[in-house]
Amino acid sequence: MPHEVKDKFKDECGVFGVFLKEPEQENDAARAAFYGLYALQHRGQESAGIAVSDGHKISLHKGMGLVTEVIKPETIKNLKGNIAIAHVRYSTTGESGIVNAQPMVFHYLQGMLGLAHNGNLTNTADLRKQLATYGSVFQTTTDTELVANLLARYSQDTLEDGLNKCLIDLKGAFALIIITEDKMIGIRDQMGIRPLCLGDYEGNYVLASETAALDTIGAKFIRDIKPGEIVIIDQEGLRSSQVVKSPRCAHCVFEYIYFARPDSTLDGINVYQARRELGKQLARESDIDVDLVIPVPDSGTAAALGYAEEAGLPFQDGLMKNRYVGRTFIQPTQKMRELSVRLKLNAVNKIVAGKRLVMVDDSIVRGTTSKQIVQMLREAGAKEVHMAVSSPPTSYPCYYGIDTSRREELIASKMEVEEIRQFIGADSLYYLSREGMFQALGGNSEKYCDACFSGLYPVGTES
Ligand code: 5GP
Ligand code: SF4
Ligand code: MG
């Protein structure tokens, strides 16, 4: 697969876990994990995997590809046991490949461990050095292997002890689901950067990155895992400990803006509603005189609807998306890149011809897609094409597990808004203000991380 070379190892992931007290059938846990994972496919399309414990040992199946390409019906049949974790991952680094795919399974003094991790640690260099001093060797460059090593080292007495010590040592963003032979554990970093929630699945516990995964398997949402909390689930039930307490949390705003599914609710805020509010606020802040609002599907749809509502303008689908184009391959040549945008999106001439319109999207990353959409709309006969973006300019990289391009590739890191407008060829360009973004998300800026917009990193950058 063609890929860009990145200066940092980063990936985007989704995690899911299920603990069945009494499995009616041997493969129920693996099957639930498969459906849960399928619901989280948008969080990673490069590798997928499921690890299952039967009380004695942990079996693992993982591979490169989409969930349905990796997890076949025969796979599920072979994954016997009542505790399962699952993981999807997307990475554009040169180090992508099966060795870095998750879950990862390890043997240690007390038995076996399976880990699924979403996020990115910021003190890996220090931890790696520290562990290497004690003789640890590593097979991969992942944070997950590091966490497993640290946990094994700290769990000489009890696993609970080890988990507590780990949580104190790990810096950065992490939503972790761990299984042993007889337990499932959920951990969230002290600022709650990456999401993790708890559900009730027919009297059993499930953990997932997003509530949409609970809905998919018919589980009921119980609550979000708290920042700095560890939950341990076994035959006895659930035990929680608040190991570290930070004066503030820092939920990722980009989950609401782009990354999470609109039907998910993260830390009390529904993603669709948040996007709609972001769109409304954007309409209040922009001064564009047009006939029509069109979304850039799918990620811009809810914001465009909010925009149209607030502006009192008609909303129409002026762009159609080919639903069967899933993964966006990063194309090596400009010509191929242009083709891949046209494969994904097409303008509806009848709707846009002769109109002055504003297209609403959630974000501009490199600007190349937006530029082509503007051109496409003009070719379809639009009289004026304005663009409104439901987030502030993305000027800084993410160190917490969302794969933003290298800083010099982020168009907003090197151009002013007017230059970006010229680059994409729009008649006008509006971005949402930072204040407006927080207002749309409930008004409390202290609750969120918005470092990719502000450069204010709540837990620092990489060491
Ligand atoms: P651009 O015009 O910058 O080339 O592309 C903008 C589009 O990229 C927007 O529609 C936005 O939804 C999408 N986008 C934003 N962040 C990400 C991301 O992390 N990964 C991918 N694949 N698309 C993204
Ligand atoms: Fe989310 Fe941006 Fe913070 Fe990364 S830097 S965690 S993408 S808000
Ligand atoms: Mg999009």
Image (tube, rainbow, N blue to C red):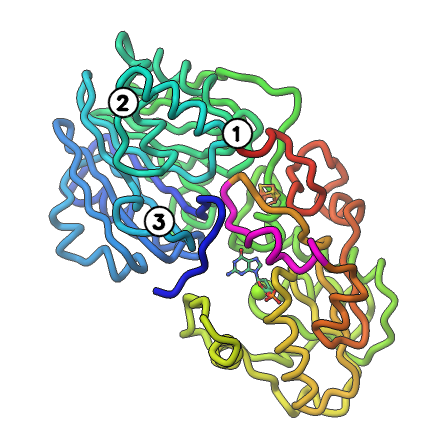
Asked whether, in this view, residue 432 is left or right of residue 173, the answer is right
x and y percentages locating residue 415 in the rendered image: 74, 60
x and y percentages locating residue 414 in the rendered image: 71, 56
Amino acid at the residue labelled 3: Glu
Asked whether, in this view, residue 318 is left or right of residue 129, the answer is right
- First in sequence, mark 2 or 1: give its number: 2
x and y percentages locating residue 152 in the rendered image: 28, 19
Ligand 2, seen in the image, is in the quarter at top right
Graded by Cα atoms within 10 Å as few (under 14), some (14 to 19) or many (20 or more), the crowding at tag 3 reads some
- Marks 2 and 1 sit apart, C-alpha to C-alpha, by 20 Å
Secondary structure state at the residue bearing disc 1: loop
Q: Would the CB of label 1 be found within 8 Å of ligand 2?
A: no
CB atoms at circles 2 and 3 under 8 Å apart? no
In the image, residue 413 lies in the stretch drawn in magenta: yes
Residue of label 1? 463
User: Which residue sits at x=45%, y=66%?
Assistant: 330
- First in sequence, mark 2 or 3: give its number: 3
Which range is magenta? 401-414
- Marks 3 and 1 sit apart, C-alpha to C-alpha, by 20 Å
**Frontmost residue, 391 versus 408:** 408
Graded by Cα atoms within 10 Å as few (under 14), some (14 to 19) or many (20 or more), the crowding at tag 2 reads some
Name above or below for residue 63 compared with residue 189: below
Q: Splitting the image into 4 quarters, where does residue 362 fall?
A: bottom right
Q: Splitting the image into 4 quarters, where does residue 107 fall?
A: top left
Graded by Cα atoms within 10 Å as few (under 14), some (14 to 19) or many (20 or more), the crowding at tag 1 reads few
CB atoms at circles 3 and 1 under 8 Å apart? no
**Frontmost residue, 195 versus 2:** 2
Residue of label 3? 95
Q: Splitting the image into 4 quarters, where does residue 454 fall?
A: top right
